[in-house]
Every structure is written in C-alpha cells, then in structure tokens.
Image: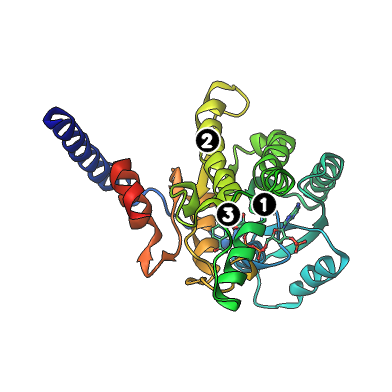
C-alpha cells in the first residue's frame, strides 16, 4: 500500500518537473507572425465555416491576409460567406465551397476545385483546419439543464446518434485530411484539428455526453498519430500537426455555458499555421473561469482514484 502511494507520488512529481522544463524550452517557438505579403500568397481550408468557431477562424485568417476556402453545407451559408468579402478591412478573401465532411465524393470534388483555384490565383495551399463538428448530446443536455431545470437520464445515447457524432467529428477529419494530404504536403503545410477539453476529461457530464467525449479523445490519437506517423513518409515528413483543445466557447453548440469568444480559438489557429515550431497542443479559452490549459494539465496529472471521486 505504502509502496503504491510512494510510486504514485514520485511519478506525479517527475511528471510535474518534466512539464515545467518542457514549458520553459517551448516559450517563444509556438507563436510567430508572417508578413502580409507572404500571407496574401497563401491559402487554407477551414471546414464548418458557416457558423461559430469555423466562421470566426475564416474571418480572422482572411482579415490578416489569407485566402480562405470555407466549407459550408447550405446555399444560405454559401451566400453569407461570399457576402463577408464585402468587409473592406479584410486583407484576404473567403472563397466558399460546399461539401459535407461525411461525403467522400463532395470532398474529392473540393480537392479538385481548390487545386484549380490555387493554380489560377498563384496561391500556395498551406493548411487545413478540421473544425466541422456536432454535439447533439451536449445540446440536449444544456437545453434540459437550463430550460427545464433537470438533467437527462444517465444513459448512453443510441448507436445511431453515436455513429453520427463519430462519423462527423472523427471520420470526417480522416476523410478531409486524407483527401487534402497531397496538396498540404506540396507546401510542407499544416494540419490543424479542433478537439476539446473533453478530449482530456471524460465523464464530467455522465453517460449522456460520452459519444462526443469519445470523439474528442479519438482526435487526440489522430493528432499524435499523424504528427508521428507522417515523419516516416518522405513526401509528408515536413507537415506539422496541431490539436487545439478549446474550453467553453460562445457558439450555437455551447449556448448556455460558453465563456470565451471564438476569436480566442482563431488566434491559436493563426499561431499553429505560422509558428516555425507549432505546439502539438493549444488550449484556447476558459473552463469554469480557469484557463483551459491549467484544467487539462492538472486533470491529466491526477491519479484516477482522485479524478473518479471528484467528477
Ligand atoms: N463551442 C464550444 O464550446 C467548443 C468547445 C470545444 C470544441 N469545440 C469544437 O469546435 C468545433 C466547432 O464548434 P462550434 O462551437 O463552432 O459549433 P457550431 O456553432 O455548432 O458550428 C458547427 C459547424 O460545423 C458544421 N458542420 C456540422 N456537421 C457538418 C458536416 N457533416 N459537414 C460539414 N460541416 C458540418 C456546421 O455547418 P452547418 O451550419 O451546415 O450545420 C457548422 O459550420 C467543433 O468541432 C466542436 O466540437 C467547440
């Protein structure tokens, strides 16, 4: 028993020391700013650009000079994105493109369209931002909690809902990343995935939120696996991969508990795009009044016998 406690305490201390040293060495390498002229020669794809975080990322990147291909699903969103080019303060452009991340044919057509546009406009395609996502469990949970003042029953969602969540949030990223990899590798570009703090903390909302949490845990593996796996591919070994893990962001998806504006996420997307050595993880925003990074780091360090009693 005593040996177990000592082993847990010493691994905890070793982890703290390693984390502190890693932070010290990383400072100054994860953020950089490129000149406007460079940005204006570069293009990126942002999925799910019709609303929320994706729309803000698209607006932010075009504001600082990028040509942004923003993916949407409806004609209204397409027109809306096109109209956002009327903002004369933006130094780049937003080019709407229609596709669903669950539809391989549409994604393949998007690759061709983007390749053609980049050739015509002499743009380097430097990255994809896998942002599109759904959280039907969270929306139902919040609606019941805040509007009906009760919590949903503590049961797992049905397989159809779980499949939908995983298909969009995880397989969607696989499809888009695989399809755009040849384009991204040409310019040694960036792959950015939008995960969540729920990719570190599972179980805080009980069983009715686990499909979403499982999807965000899966993105942790996808991000780490891509980052390490692409090193072994001679065409792709210069591609950098970052996972952003936002806290509670004020969007349709998080109407009741949103704490930080979406621009906190888009600032980190810009950093992940432009830093010479981008971080493997960024933690924009807050969770219950605390910086998301502190919450995630602290939670990950605690042994499960503590986290299991605290959640
Ligand atoms: N809000 C938060 O607190 C928070 C925190 C952590 C992580 N995130 C993550 O951030 C990302 C964006 O979330 P958000 O808060 O901005 O959500 P949102 O406001 O609900 O927007 C979701 C976006 O994804 C698009 N989308 C959904 N399913 C799609 C599909 N099958 N194909 C293509 N596009 C699809 C939506 O398009 P339509 O308009 O056509 O539906 C919309 O543009 C998600 O991955 C989410 O998990 C959010």
Circle on res. 44: 1
In this rendering, the label closer to the viewer, 3 or 1: 3
Distance from mark 2 CB to nearest ligand 1 atom below 8 Å: no
Q: Which residue: 44% across, 47% down?
A: 200
- Considering depth in this image, is 280 or 247 the residue closer to the camera? 247
- Residue 164 appears in the picture as rendered: yes
In this rendering, the label closer to the viewer, 3 or 2: 3
Q: Which residue: 64% across, 49% down?
A: 130
Dots 2, 1 in contact, CB < 8 A:
no
Dots 3, 1 in contact, CB < 8 A:
no
**Secondary structure beneath disc 3?**
helix
Circle on res. 57: none
Q: Which residue: 65% across, 42% down?
A: 170
Distance from mark 3 CB to nearest ligand 1 atom below 8 Å: no
- Considering depth in this image, is 16 or 126 the residue closer to the camera? 16
Q: Which residue: 52% across, 71% down?
A: 258
**Image quadrant where residue 49 sits:** bottom right
**Secondary structure beneath disc 2?**
helix
Q: Earlier in the sequence, mark 3 or mark 1?
A: 1
Classify 48 as above or below 250: above
Q: Earlier in the sequence, mark 2 or mark 1?
A: 1
Where ligand 1 lies, by quadrant?
bottom right
**Secondary structure beneath disc 1?**
strand
Q: Which residue is mark 3?
A: 208
Q: Which residue is mark 2?
A: 221
Distance from mark 1 CB to nearest ligand 1 atom below 8 Å: no
Q: Earlier in the sequence, mark 3 or mark 2?
A: 3
């Amino acid at each position: 028993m005593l040996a177990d406690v000592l082993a847990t305490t010493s691994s905890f201390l070793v982890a703290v020391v390693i984390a502190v040293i890693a932070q010290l060495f990383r400072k100054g390498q994860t953020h950089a700013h490129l000149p406007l002229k460079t940005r204006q020669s570069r293009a990126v794809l942002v999925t799910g650009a019709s609303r929320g975080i994706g729309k803000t990322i698209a607006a932010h990147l075009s504001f600082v000079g990028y040509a942004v291909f923003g993916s949407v699903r409806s004609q209204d969103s397409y027109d809306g994105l096109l109209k956002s080019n009327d903002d004369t303060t933006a130094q780049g452009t937003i080019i709407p493109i229609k596709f669903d991340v669950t539809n391989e044919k549409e994604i393949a057509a998007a690759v061709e369209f983007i390749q053609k546009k980049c050739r015509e406009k002499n743009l380097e395609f430097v990255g994809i931002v896998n942002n599109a996502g759904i959280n039907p469990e969270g929306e139902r949970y919040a609606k019941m909690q805040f509007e009906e003042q009760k919590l949903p029953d503590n049961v797992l969602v049905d397989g159809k809902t779980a499949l939908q969540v995983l298909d969009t949030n995880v397989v969607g990223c696989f499809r888009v990343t695989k399809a755009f990899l040849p384009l991204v590798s040409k310019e040694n570009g960036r792959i950015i995935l939008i995960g969540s703090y729920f990719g570190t903390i599972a179980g805080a909302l009980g069983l009715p939120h686990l499909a979403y949490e499982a999807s965000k845990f899966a993105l942790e593996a996808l991000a780490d696996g891509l980052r390490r796996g692409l090193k072994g591919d001679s065409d792709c070994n210069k591609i950098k991969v970052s996972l952003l893990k936002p806290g509670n962001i004020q969007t349709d998806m998080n109407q009741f508990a949103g704490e930080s504006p979406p621009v906190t996420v888009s600032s980190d997307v810009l950093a992940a795009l432009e830093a010479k050595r981008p971080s493997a993880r960024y933690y924009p925003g807050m969770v219950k009044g605390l910086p998301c990074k502190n919450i995630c780091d602290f939670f990950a360090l605690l042994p499960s016998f503590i986290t299991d009693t605290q959640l």
